[in-house]
Every structure is written in C-alpha cells, then in structure tokens.
Image (cartoon, helix red, strand yellow):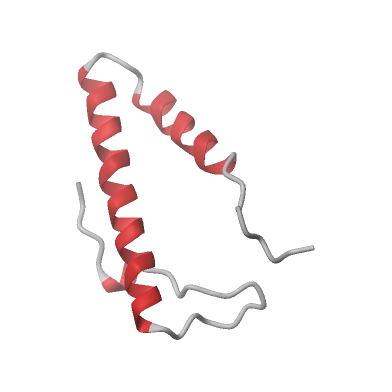
Amino acid sequence: MSARTSKDTPTWRQPDGKPVSCLEKIKVLNQNIQEIETLCADALEDGVLMGCDADQIKAALHELIDGLKAPHSHKK
C-alpha cells in the first residue's frame, strides 16, 4: 500500500465551497481517508489472494462509495 502524502490530501470544503479551516477537523478527515485507503487495500489484497478479479473488487468498492448517502446533508 502506498502512503498518502500531504500533497494527496484534498482541500476539504464546506457545502458553500469555502475551505474547512479547523485544523482538528482537517486532521480527522485526513485520518479517515487514510484508514479507508488501508481497509480498501486490504480488501483488494484479500480478494486477489482468494482468486478474485481485481477489477471486479475495485468496481464493487466504487459502487459501495457511490451508494453512500450523506446523513446530514445541507443541500436542498
């Protein structure tokens, strides 16, 4: 698995497009992304080791993410 660098982390934005400025919030968001990356890499590795197609596993992970609903969305 590749380690993420600060260049890889997005500028987190609020619904109005303004950047999130709270350093603690940014830290938590970046840690969450790093944890998700690790978990996805582990799932991909497990699947490939069990003989599954890597592209199918990636597609399933994309579908999972695309299906997530924002629980407290401020968009109308």
Query: Viewer-proximal residue, 31 or 71?
Result: 71
- Using residue 1 as the reference point, say whether residue 67 is left or right of it: right
Query: Viewer-proximal residue, 67 or 10?
Result: 67
Q: Which residue sits furthest top?
A: 51
Find residue 32 and report its image quarter. bottom left
Residue at image position (54%, 74%) is 13
Please state the horizontal and vertical placement of residue 48, each as a whole percent of the image: 26, 22
Please state the horizontal and vertical placement of residue 23, each as a whole percent of the image: 36, 82
The vertical placement of 20 against 44, above or below, is below
Residue at image position (38%, 75%) is 26
Please state the horizontal and vertical placement of residue 64, each as a whole percent of the image: 51, 36
Query: Viewer-proximal residue, 24 or 36?
Result: 24
Find residue 11 and report its image quarter. bottom left
Q: Which residue sits furthest bottom?
A: 21
Residue at image position (25%, 46%) is 38
The vertical placement of 24 against 38, above or below, is below
